[in-house]
Amino acid sequence: MIGKTFKFFLNKIPRPVLIRLSYFVKPFFLFTLRGNKYTDPIDGRSFSKFLPYGYEEQRENVLSPSTLSLERHRLLWLFLKDHTTFFSAPHKVLHFAPEQAFYKRFRKLKNLDYTTTDLNSPLADVKADICDLPFEDNSFDFILCNHVLEHIPNDTKAMQELYRILEPGGTAILQIPQDLKREKTFEDDSIKDPKQRAKIFGQYDHVRVYGRDYFEKLRGIGFKVEEVDLTSPLSPELIEKYRLAKGEIIPVAKK
């Protein structure tokens, strides 16, 4: 059983540090949490429970012990597998801030011409500012940029750059943490205190909370946006088994 002290550290340790520590503690979790109640669809492994995770508000039973995926990662995996040709057809892919759950798996796919980019990540092939990308126009037919834009002060410029480098007919999946109950996106540059930012924006290094107008902003850039609710046709039992966030929208943007 995971004690309160350990839950506290899971809640406070930044995700990049947690990922590095995972190489040492993962075998322990794979053994102690073995079971068949919950399944990570990314690797097919099952467990008696998942781990807790969160910054301001801790979510129980969401962090996969094997891939370190969260709800959004598992949802994206299911979408790519069941609703795209990502795993079968040739694609030239640009992946921003590559997630640990995906990086090695995508790198091994022989059908992908796969490039990673980020300003700071050690997993990035190309160190770049999303607002000033070193790629030519129409360079990629598939872009993954998930939970990045909420960190970027000038998200309009970032969206314009994503549109510029996406090939006509290409697909960009642009997930963000979103409050669908909020009509308008909220941001306030005057809030500087990390604790206050975490309380208001959900994480200390987020600069806004996106509302339902996010999709229209993407459309204003030029994207054709499909708002995909992948959980809608799934049974409650399967949503629970995979530990997905019911109603989470995947923004699928095309050029």
Image (spheres, rainbow, N blue to C red):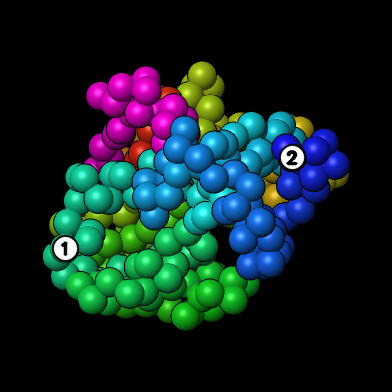
Magenta extent: 221-245
Secondary structure type for disc 2 = loop
Question: Whole-percent x and y of residue 161?
Answer: 40, 63
Judged left or right of residue 188, residue 88 is left
Up/down of 48 relative to 73, above or below: above
Q: Is residue 48 visible?
A: yes
Q: Residues within 10 Å of mark 2 (few under 14, many from 20)?
A: few
According to the image, label 1 marks what residue?
88
Mark 1: amino acid: Ser
Q: Is residue 87 magenta?
A: no
Mark 2: amino acid: Ile
Answer with the quarter of the image where residue 208 lies: top right
Question: Answer yes or no: do the residues labelled 2 and 1 have beta carbons within 8 Å?
Answer: no
**Which residue sits at x=36%, y=74%?**
107
Question: Whole-percent x and y of residue 77?
Answer: 35, 49
According to the image, label 2 marks what residue?
2
Q: Residues within 10 Å of mark 1 (few under 14, many from 20)?
A: few
Numbered label attached to residue 228: none
Answer with the quarter of the image where residue 199 lies: top right
Question: Whole-percent x and y of residue 93?
Answer: 30, 68
Question: Whole-percent x and y of residue 121?
Answer: 59, 71
Up/down of 172 relative to 189, above or below: below
